[in-house]
């Protein structure tokens, strides 16, 4: 038995596990697939968006820096063309020009200088004392002399301050001269420094040698490789903006966006850690993962609960099935016992009939003259009478046995409920006496007869009476049976003073297989069958009970239903 | 005229004793121990008034025999004898034209009463038929 139970448990365990696995597989797989696809697509489009955004940003700044430089160059060229060398070589005139420029453009122009073909600064306007400075050896001077104009890299120069120079060459009486302007580094630096995105995004400008042309946000020692690549690749890039992602020394993925400035002399580089640039994406990823994990947990929990519940149902159904099959076997046994009893009863009936007939025959013979005078005639007649009456007794016994074994007769008859109750009380009287139960009746006299199956109604009432007697078996008590007419119904009430039915059981007492009797004592079918019978008649059974104060069953039988049942039959 | 009775039961001792008792009560009695035999006897004694027929018999049972009797000899009345267990079949028998039924073991006086009534009924029937025939014959010969 234990072994059997174990294998049963194993069966239910594996059933639970399989259901759980199926639920999890079916629920989680599509969730993961769908969220992965969406996440992947989102990842791609977000990368594209970020890239487009950064490229746009760099392009805008490239344009604005280029136009800044072009504008400044234009200003200086205009100055050189508009005024002659003589005018500009005049220091006070030059100071006026510088003042005018500073008024119009802010402190972008730091100073102006006029340099002759030998590299000597003949005139100077500005905050520094640079008059008569000799630039013949300066790189910018040599380069500027060869072309019309020149924009230098940022350098410390004679003053030891970072700055860069715009120089414009012009001729005066066959001699070239140069108008030179110093551009304020701070003003220029602001153009680039303003590019600040996230926590790690910033921009700077490099020259071809890899020297900073602006002050970068961080003290970074640029590994040259990416910047060199930028220089190399940028030329090939069609809209002038170059985008790469590289690992830096600390193994962080860094985005570099670069664009060439100043006709390829300078490189505007925007750099940002990928983790920072894609922080929104990462947050979305984290949220998505959190949701997936939570949903997964919810699915697992639900699956667990659902599968457990389902398997419990299955187990319950299996148990009920087992009980039903037990019930069927039991019923089958009873039926065969009944058949046997019927057979025996019938077989006994025939010999008894013969015996009674023989006795009758002797009686007939005793009527004849010869015996009339016999002195034992009286004794003979007494003995024969005894045989006859005992024969009748046998007949009654066999008839009862046969009627017990007969199938329930469900054909409707005219039934007087009160007579039925009296009969049942007579049947139960013996049991009641043993159980110390007194039976009272309160029957309404003029009840009409109803057309129902007598045996079925008998079964219902007997069941209720037996239940009541069972309930009062230990303590004794009183059983009250009453009948009365209530409109279209006959109400039969069976009330006992037993221990009552607990509230939790009240709702279930008409359920099949519900029993509070110990195993083997009750099938739990009695009340459910009663309920079925009465419902079939179109009536109802109600139960009222309080623990400790007994239970009352009210059977409601319709007067009319007899007709329906007859027509149905 | 004494009623002529046919007693049918598979229990030989029962039939024998019952025959003696019925004879003593001024009836003419034929006996048979099975349905088949009963039909044979009836064939030879067409003026049988009442058949006392046990319901439960091996082979051709009472109900079947009753059917055959009613088919061939519609005027002959049948009283069924039955144990309680076969009361349904007794009722079935009544539906198929048996005159009445009695529970076994039965009281001889009750049986005599039923036989008497059944005989009376059968003879009334015969009388009516005879009268009808006479009427028919008379009308045929234009005497009415």
Image (tube, coloured by chain):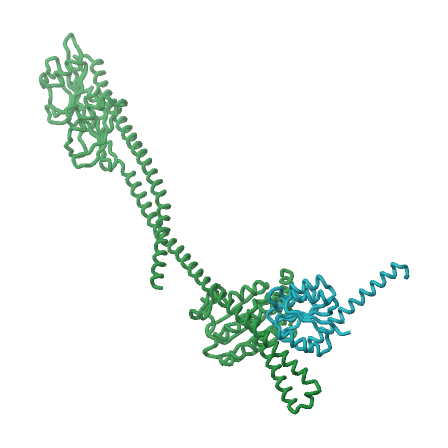
Q: Residue furthest bottom?
A: A375
Q: Position of residue A440 (x, y in %)?
A: 56, 78
Looking at the rendered image, the quarter that the N terminus of chain A falls into is: bottom left
In this rendering, the answer to whether A11 lies above or below A451 is: above
Q: Position of residue B34 (x, y in %)?
A: 63, 67
In this rendering, the answer to whether A133 lies above or below A332 is: above
Residue A111 at least partly seen: no
Q: Is residue A291 left or right of residue A313?
A: left
> Is A474 or A32 nearer to us in this picture?
A474
Q: Residue furthest right?
A: B143
In this rendering, the answer to whether A353 lies above or below A156 is: below
Q: Position of residue A438 (x, y in %)?
A: 53, 80
Query: Which quadrant would residue A45 be assigned to in this image?
Result: top left
> Is A72 or A250 nearer to us in this picture?
A250
Picture mark count: 0
Residue at 33% from the left image edge and 35% from the top image edge:
A41
Q: Is residue A353 left or right of residue A336?
A: right
In this rendering, the answer to whether A78 lies above or below B46 is: above
Looking at the rendered image, the quarter that the C terminus of chain A falls into is: bottom right
Q: Position of residue A367 (x, y in %)?
A: 69, 85
Apparent colour of chain A: green
The chain shown in cyan is which?
Answer: B
> Is A468 or A223 nearer to us in this picture?
A468
Query: Which quadrant would residue A423 be assigned to in this image?
Result: bottom right
Q: Residue furthest front?
A: B44
Residue A243 at least partly seen: yes
Query: Which quadrant would residue A203 be assigned to in this image?
Result: top left
Q: Is residue A489 left or right of residue A187?
A: right
């Amino acid at each position: 038995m234990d072994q059997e139970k174990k294998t049963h448990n194993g069966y239910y365990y594996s059933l639970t596990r399989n259901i759980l696995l199926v639920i999890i597989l079916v629920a989680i797989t599509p969730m993961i697939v769908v969220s992965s696809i969406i996440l992947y697509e989102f990842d791609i489009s977000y990368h594209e968006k970020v890239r487009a955004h950064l490229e746009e940003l760099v392009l805008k700044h490239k344009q604005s820096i280029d136009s800044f430089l072009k504008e400044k160059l234009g200003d200086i060229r205009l100055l050189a063309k508009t005024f002659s060398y003589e005018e500009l070589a005049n220091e006070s005139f030059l100071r006026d020009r510088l003042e005018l420029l500073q008024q119009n453009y802010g402190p972008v122009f730091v100073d102006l200088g006029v340099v002759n073909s030998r590299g000597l600064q003949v005139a100077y306007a500005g905050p520094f004392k640079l008059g008569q400075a000799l630039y013949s050896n300066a790189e910018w001077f040599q380069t500027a002399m060869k072309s019309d104009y020149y924009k230098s890299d940022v350098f410390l120069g004679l003053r030891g301050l970072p700055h860069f120079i715009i120089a414009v060459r012009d001729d005066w009486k066959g001699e070239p001269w140069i108008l030179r302007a110093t551009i304020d580094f701070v003003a220029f630096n602001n153009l680039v420094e303003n590019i600040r995105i996230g926590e790690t995004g910033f921009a700077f400008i490099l020259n071809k040698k890899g020297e900073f042309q602006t002050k970068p946000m961080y003290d970074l020692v640029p590994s040259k490789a990416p910047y060199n690549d930028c220089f190399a690749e940028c030329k090939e890039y069609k809209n002038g903006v170059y985008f790469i992602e590289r690992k830096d020394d600390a193994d962080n993925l860094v985005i570099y966006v670069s664009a060439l400035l100043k006709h390829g002399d300078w490189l505007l580089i925007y750099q940002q850690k990928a983790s920072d640039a894609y922080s929104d994406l990462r947050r979305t990823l984290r949220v998505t993962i959190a949701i997936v994990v939570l949903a997964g947990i919810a699915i697992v929990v639900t699956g667990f609960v659902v599968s457990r519940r389902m398997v419990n149902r299955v187990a319950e159904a299996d148990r009920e099935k087992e009980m039903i099959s037990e019930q069927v076997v039991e019923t089958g046994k009873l039926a065969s016992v009944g058949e046997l009893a019927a057979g025996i009863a019938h077989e006994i009936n025939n010999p008894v009939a013969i015996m009674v007939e023989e006795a009758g025959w002797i009686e007939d013979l005793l009527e004849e003259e010869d015996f009339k005078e016999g002195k034992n005639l009286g004794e003979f007649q007494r003995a024969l009478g005894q045989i006859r009456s005992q024969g009748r007794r046998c007949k009654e016994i066999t008839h009862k046995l046969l009627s017990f074994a007969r199938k329930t007769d469900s054909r409707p008859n005219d039934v007087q409920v009160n007579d039925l109750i009296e009969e049942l009380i007579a049947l139960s009287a013996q049991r009641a006496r043993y159980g110390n139960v007194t039976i009272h009746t309160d029957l309404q006299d003029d009840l009409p007869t109803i057309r129902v199956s007598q045996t079925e109604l008998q079964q219902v009432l007997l069941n209720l009476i037996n239940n009541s007697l069972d309930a009062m078996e230990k303590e004794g008590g009183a059983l009250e049976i009453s009948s009365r007419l209530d409109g279209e119904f006959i109400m039969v009430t069976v009330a006992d003073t037993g221990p009552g039915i607990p509230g939790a059981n009240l709702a279930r007492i008409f359920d099949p297989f519900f029993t509070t009797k110990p195993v083997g004592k009750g099938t739990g079918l009695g009340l459910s069958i009663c309920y079925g019978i009465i419902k079939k008649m179109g009536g109802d059974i109600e139960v009222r009970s309080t623990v400790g104060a007994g239970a009352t069953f009210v059977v409601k039988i319709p007067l009319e239903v007899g007709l329906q049942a007859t027509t149905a039959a | 005229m004494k009623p002529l009775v046919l007693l049918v039961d598979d229990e030989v001792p029962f039939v024998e004793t019952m025959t003696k008792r019925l004879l003593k009560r001024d009836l003419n009695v034929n006996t048979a121990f099975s349905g088949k035999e009963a039909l044979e006897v009836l064939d030879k004694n067409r003026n049988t008034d009442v058949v006392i027929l046990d319901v439960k018999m091996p082979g051709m049972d009472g109900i079947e025999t009753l059917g055959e009797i009613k088919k061939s000899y519609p005027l002959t009345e049948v009283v069924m004898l039955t144990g309680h267990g076969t009361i349904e079949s007794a009722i079935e028998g009544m539906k198929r034209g048996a005159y009445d039924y009695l529970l076994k073991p039965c009281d001889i006086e009750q049986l005599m009463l039923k036989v008497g009534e059944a005989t009376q009924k059968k003879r009334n029937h015969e009388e009516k038929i005879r009268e009808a025939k006479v009427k028919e014959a008379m009308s045929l010969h234009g005497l009415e």
